[in-house]
Every structure is written in structure tokens, then in C-alpha cells.
Image: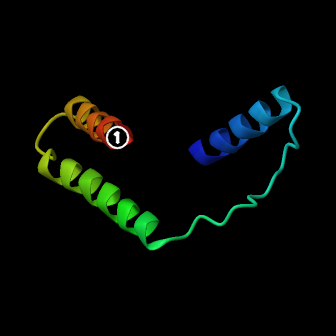
């Protein structure tokens, strides 16, 4: 259900900025560095959740948000 909301949100943003509602990517985004970064990011998230499993849901959510923010910066 969340995926549907995400797709509808993207389509709405495209419509708001006069873009084609359904677009396909034109740039291929495949490289060894990309796969490595995805592996590291996924591992960091899984380890964060695994190591926090005894905590409350709010604590885990906060830690996951911090990991994502740190990866973004």
C-alpha cells in the first residue's frame, strides 16, 4: 500500500511540474561503486535494526533515521 502512495506522489509531482506523468529513466545507473554503496547502506540498516531489537519501536525508528541521515550527508 505504501508503494502505491509513493507512485501516486511521484505522478502528482510530475503533473504539478508539467512533466509526463509516466516516464522511464534514460540514464543507466549500474556500476560496481553503486552496488558496493547499496550493500554498505543495506548492511548498516540491517545491523542497526538487529542490534536495537530489544529497544522500543520509537528508538529503533530514531536510530534508522540517524543512519539514513548520516549516509545522506
Give whichever of 2, 32 is nearer the camera.
32
- Image quadrant containing the C terminus: top left
Q: Residue 41 occupies which quadrant of the picture?
A: bottom left
**Residue drawn at (80%, 36%) of the image:** 14
Above or below for 47 versus 61: below
Tally of numbered discs = 1
The colour style of the image is rainbow
Q: Position of residue 20 (x, y in %)?
A: 88, 43
Give whichever of 11, 52 is nearer the camera.
11
Above or below for 35 versus 22: below
**Residue drawn at (22%, 49%) of the image:** 49
Above or below for 32 versus 34: below
Q: Position of residue 66 (x, y in %)?
A: 27, 34
Q: Position of residue 65 (x, y in %)?
A: 32, 34
Q: Secondary structure at mark 1?
A: helix
Name the side, left or right, on which 20 lies relative to 25: right
Q: Residue furthest bottom?
A: 32
Name the side, left or right, on which 72 lies relative to 64: right
Q: Residue 70 occupies which quadrant of the picture?
A: top left
**Residue drawn at (26%, 31%) of the image:** 62
Q: Crowding near pointer 1: few (<14 within 10 Å), some, many (20+)?
A: some
Give whichever of 68, 3 is nearer the camera.
68
Above or below for 47 versus 35: above
Q: Name the residue beneath numbered marker 1.
A: 68
Name the side, left or right, on which 69 lies relative to 48: right
Q: Residue furthest top?
A: 16
Name the side, left or right, on which 18 lies relative to 48: right
**Residue drawn at (38%, 40%) of the image:** 72
Give whichever of 23, 52 is nearer the camera.
23
Amino acid at each position: 500500500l505504501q508503494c502505491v502512495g509513493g507512485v501516486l506522489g511521484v505522478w502528482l509531482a510530475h503533473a504539478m511540474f508539467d512533466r509526463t506523468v509516466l516516464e522511464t529513466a534514460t540514464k543507466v545507473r549500474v556500476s560496481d561503486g553503486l552496488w558496493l554503496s547499496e550493500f554498505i547502506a543495506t548492511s548498516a540498516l540491517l545491523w542497526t535494526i538487529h542490534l536495537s531489537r530489544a529497544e522500543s519501536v520509537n528508538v529503533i525508528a530514531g536510530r534508522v533515521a540517524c543512519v539514513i541521515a548520516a549516509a545522506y550527508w
